[in-house]
Image (spheres, rainbow, N blue to C red):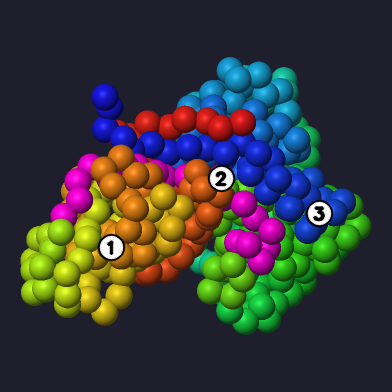
Amino acid sequence: MPRPIEAIVHRDALAANLEVARQAAAGARVWAVVKADAYGHGIANAFPALQRADGFALLDLAEAELLRDLGWRGPILLLEGCFDGRDLETCSRLHLWHVVHDSRQIDRLAALKTDRPHRVFLKMNSGMNRLGFAPDRYRAAWLRLDALAQVEQIVLMTHLANADADDAAATLPALAAFEAATHDLPGERSVCNSAATLRFGERLAAGGAAWVRPGILLYGSSPDASVHSADAWGLAPAMTLRTRLIAVQELAAGASIGYGSSFTAAGPMRIGVAACGYADGYPRLAPGGNALGTPVLVDGVRTRTVGRVSMDMITVDLGPVPTATIGSEVVLWGRADAGTMLSIDEVASAAGTVGYELMCARAPRVPVTVAA
Ligand SMILES: *Cc1c(COP(=O)(O)O)cnc(C)c1O
């Protein structure tokens, strides 16, 4: 029998979450962001559920190639653009759209021999200070691209640093900077990640010339979990990480659990040992000390971790679920057989991280299955 851990990808949730993005930004076209192997879900697993997207956005040429092999003929966007001249030739061959964020990428486009003009997303730096042209250099970059025979369309783009901030107004200066630098340039616009799609999609999609770029929301995690839960946004978890109990321990008062004996039983206690640890992608920093545990579902009942997360195991309090025994289902996040849910965002918040990181951290040793 294989070790009982598995990740389940819920295609119904992916498709429903894509609809949430569409409705939040009605009239806009939607890129499904599937970088990092669809945020750990697997591009091939996610693709059939996301075919109602208008295009797929990612970073990696191998992932673009995979989407073409899967039969996707529509738009594909490279979010970091091309890293060298060879990539540009691949873009011509696979018909990929690509981000242009610095002048060397324009130099290489100018030197490219192609009879298939490219579509590019010209990126403005609106305050994130990672990639993109500063607002005062944006127009010159646009004019250079516009003059190239190798370019047939330029979409105006930026990426927001604070779209998920507790205070929604924190992103207004970046929106204003983008608007000021682009208001008299022609062409479509692409501004919104998941947080901005949900919060500002209605406003920014008005006019019908927008492309939104939701990623995390497709997977059922809230982009601003400290303000709105996934549930509050109407998002359903697209991944369940689940395993089973492989041992049960009866502790006497004063006995402790796991490395460092970080949890000590105050009275007699039943503990379940679940086959999942940090080598599976569960966060080692998920707390399990006496003061605080990390939520987990055992046979669909909410309980908590106790003791430290180790490489291959975690230990959980079976107090709330006295019928649990070896073989009982343990859901680390997602949907339990009983129908109960545990949001990945709750686990992430307990461990001091975000749902994004937990999804992407699913280890290769965890097999993935697909539910319809
Ligand atoms: C990853 C990424 C997105 C998607 O961000 P989410 O917060 O996951 O919605 C959008 N745009 C760019 C440029 C990205 O790199």
Q: Residue at x 27, y 27 (%)?
A: 2
Q: Where residue 9 is drawn, which disc sits there?
A: none
Q: Mark 1 belongs to which amino acid?
A: Asp
Count neighbours of disc 1 (C-alpha within 10 A) and say few if under 14, some if 14 to 19, many if 20 or more. Answer: many
63 and 303: which is toward the camera = 303
Residue 335 position within the rendered picture, expressed as x and y whole percent measured from the top left: 51, 48
Instruction: Specify start and end residues of the magenta stretch as a single range.
Output: 230-249
Measured along the vertical axis of the image, is residue 48 above or below residue 300?
above
For label 1, being within 8 Å of ligand 1 is answered no
| Residue where numbered disc 2 is placed | 238
- Which of labels 2 and 3 is toward the front? 2
Residue 40 position within the rendered picture, expressed as x and y whole percent measured from the top left: 45, 41
Count neighbours of disc 3 (C-alpha within 10 A) and say few if under 14, some if 14 to 19, many if 20 or more. Answer: some
Q: Mark 2 belongs to which amino acid?
A: Ala
| Residue where numbered disc 1 is placed | 317
Q: Mark 3 belongs to which amino acid?
A: Gln
For label 3, being within 8 Å of ligand 1 is answered no
In the rendered image, is residue 219 in sight? Answer: yes
Assess whether residue 140 is covered by the magenta stretch.
Answer: no
- Measured in 3D between alpha carbons, the distance from the residue under mark 2 to the one under mark 3, in whole angstroms, is 19 Å
